[in-house]
Image (spheres, coloured by chain):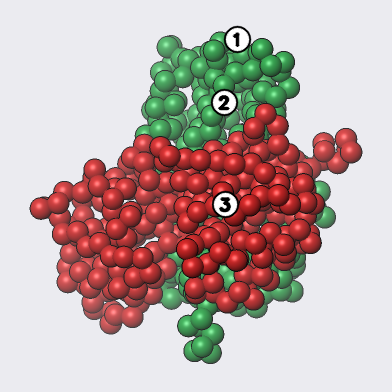
Chain colours: A red, B green
Amino acid sequence: MGKVTVVGIGPGNDDEMTPKATAAIRGAEVVVGYHTYLKLAESLLKRGEQEIIGTGMKQEIERAQAAVEAAAAGKSVAVVSGGDAGVYGMAGLILEQILKLTEDRRPLFETVAGISAVNAAAAALGAPLMHDYATISLSDLLTPWETIERRLRAAGLGDFVIALYNPQSHSRRENIKKAQYILQQYKSQYTPVGIVTDAGRPNEKKVIASLQDFTQEEITMSSLVIVGNSQTYVREGYMITPRGYENKEAAS
Amino acid sequence: MGKVTVVGIGPGNDDEMTPKATAAIRGAEVVVGYHTYLKLAESLLKRGEQEIIGTGMKQEIERAQAAVEAAAAGKSVAVVSGGDAGVYGMAGLILEQILKLTEDRRPLFETVAGISAVNAAAAALGAPLMHDYATISLSDLLTPWETIERRLRAAGLGDFVIALYNPQSHSRRENIKKAQYILQQYKSQYTPVGIVTDAGRPNEKKVIASLQDFTQEEITMSSLVIVGNSQTYVREGYMITPRGYENKEAAS
């Protein structure tokens, strides 16, 4: 029986890919992925032995269909996803495609978790998460802006640490500015903001600024932006959110 | 110069620990951790060669001090943390202890990211995250209940998928019931709820129920509870949150 394994490869270096992910990619007959992620997993691929199906950006549905069709035909298929496949990744799309098939054609399904971008970025900044946090994608390709704005306001109200995924793309440069403006209605303008680009890769770059003065020049398609909560502070280049509230509140 | 590396070991099986985490533990002169996590990393420890400092529950500060003191004395120290060390883990406490030292005594610091509980639990359930999510710890040991309740309400308002960490302990059995009651004021009573206990371990157990009818009997100290958003559905035993909103809304 065929099987699709959706594999989170983490930030994109072999050193932060789990042995389970490595084995799933090496053991597959077919490997499917976005070109960029296939390149990051290149050292694991056995070109010649394995069938490799690479697709371009925004072709998620084609990718999912190709993977599920191959598995329905009896193949073992690994779908390579950046970070964790379950966070803005391929796991959901693959499951939806599998469930569209009649029961007799449905392949097995498994997800292999990976280090998500928020965890890799946090590790680079010090300890900015540590307490309750919310992730919000600023991409309005599949989500109306109204929904994104509602989430930003709710996360602001709740004093969450906020991780902004997909903060900017070539064609979408306004959303991060809008988010910055909205969050200033709920958080102090001095709230620390950490921007990590290519987290966990050799060219990793980080900037720590404040909610008021961070600029989109620091942000690319490969950035993750972490906005602190009311307790977050910066010291010696580290962005730190204390785990407890009692001490801070007792001290203030 | 001494160094503290805070290492996220993931869910607790060697197969989901990154090579970077494995190397950091093996290469340390001193390994510090909560007994339970040391047990999970036992196969990596070189007892006899390495100094192993195990401490009990709720002794986070003692643990952090022991680690930082050893590193200030010139040792390389690995602090073992469950899941990701940056999510309700040891990274922040260690940094705070390091910054208390005078500059000449401060050891180097690094965090090695790990698979967080929310990612391991999501992989077990199918694809329940996929879109914007919030993590909230129900432990009121270090956080006043008012703050936790404020976060629950905000996350409900924002229609986030919600991951509840520390849903229950022996001495704290009411918070999960209170959370269930609060979230029903914002979410449909039929919202899918996934409960994963010991995610990613051999004894992993999962239950999918609804916001209205899930019971705390299924929940232990090692459980993570994931509450869906308004688009989350259950099919064939999988909990799925679609990534996009447009299709669903156009179809309804």
What residue do we see at 67% from left, 29% from top? A236
Residue A235 rendering spot, x and y as whole percentages: 70, 32
Quarter of the figure with residue B159: bottom right
Can residue B225 be seen here? The reply is no
* Mark in front: 2 vs 1: 2
Q: Residues within 10 Å of mark 2 (few under 14, many from 20)?
A: some
Hey, what amino acid is under mark 3? Glu
Residue A36 rendering spot, x and y as whole percentages: 33, 55
Gap in Å between the C-alphas at discs 3 and 1?
A: 42 Å
Hey, what amino acid is under mark 1? Ala
User: Residue at label 2?
Assistant: B109
Hey, what amino acid is under mark 2? Phe
Residue A153 rendering spot, x and y as whole percentages: 72, 66
Kind of element beneath mark 1: loop
User: Residue at label 3?
Assistant: A217
* Mark in front: 3 vs 1: 3
**Residue A33 or B170: which is nearer the viewer?**
A33
Identify whether A154 is placed above or below B235: above
Q: Which mark is residue B73?
A: 1
Residue A82 rendering spot, x and y as whole percentages: 39, 54
Kind of element beneath mark 2: strand
The answer for which chain carries disc 1 is: B
In the visual, does B91 lie left or right of A96? Answer: right
Q: Can marks 3 and 1 be said to lie on one chain?
A: no
Q: Earlier in the sequence, mark 2 or mark 1?
A: 1
